[in-house]
Amino acid sequence: MERFWERVRTRAMSGEGIGREDALAVLSLGNDYLWRLLDVTEPVRRRFKGDGIRLCSIVNAKSGLCSEDCAFCAQSVQSAAGIGEYPLLSGEEIFREAAAAKERGAREFSIVASGLAMRNREE
C-alpha cells in the first residue's frame, strides 16, 4: 500500500497528475484511508496552493423530487438515496444559513436546489 501512496504523491508533486486508474483507486478506498490521503496530499497542496485554506459552504434550498435523472444526484425522483424532501426555503432561512456559514469561517456561500430551473418568479 505504501508503494501506491508514494506513486500518487510523486506523480502529483511532478505536476503530471495521478491518472485515471490511481484516481479511481483512491476513490474506492473509502473513509478508512481519509487521514492517510490527507497526509499524502498535504505536500502537494502546499506546493501548488500554498499554506492557506479557504472554506466554502452551501445550503440545499430545495430538496428532492427533481424531475431530472442525473445518475450522480440524490435529488432525482429516480434516486433510491432516501434524502429528505422539502420545498424552497424562505429567504430568511437561507440568510440564516449564510450567516451561520460565515460564523464557521466560510468565505464563499452558494445556494443549491433540486430541479432544472426555478418554476416561477417566487422561486
Image: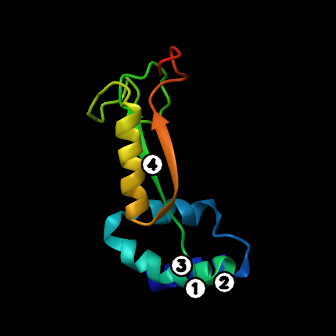
Crowd around label 4: few <14 · some 14–19 · many ≥20 (10 Å): some
The reply to whether discs 4 and 2 touch (Cβ–Cβ < 8 Å) is: no
Indicate the amino acid at tag 1.
Answer: Pro
Lower position in the chain sequence, tag 4 or tag 2? 2
**Mark 3 and mark 2: Cα distance apart in space:** 10 Å
Is 94 above or below relative to 107?
above
- According to the picture, the residue beneath numbered tag 1 turns out to be 43
Counting from the top left corner in percent of width and height, residue 58 is at 45, 48
Q: In the current view of this chain or complex, which residue is farthest to the front?
A: 92
The reply to whether discs 1 and 2 touch (Cβ–Cβ < 8 Å) is: yes
Counting from the top left corner in percent of width and height, residue 98 is at 42, 50
Counting from the top left corner in percent of width and height, residue 37 is at 45, 75
Q: Which residue is rendered at x = 72% and y = 81% of the image?
A: 14
**Mark 4 and mark 2: Cα distance apart in space:** 28 Å
Q: How is the image coloured?
A: rainbow
Which mark is nearer the camera, 3 or 2? 2
Lower position in the chain sequence, tag 4 or tag 1? 1
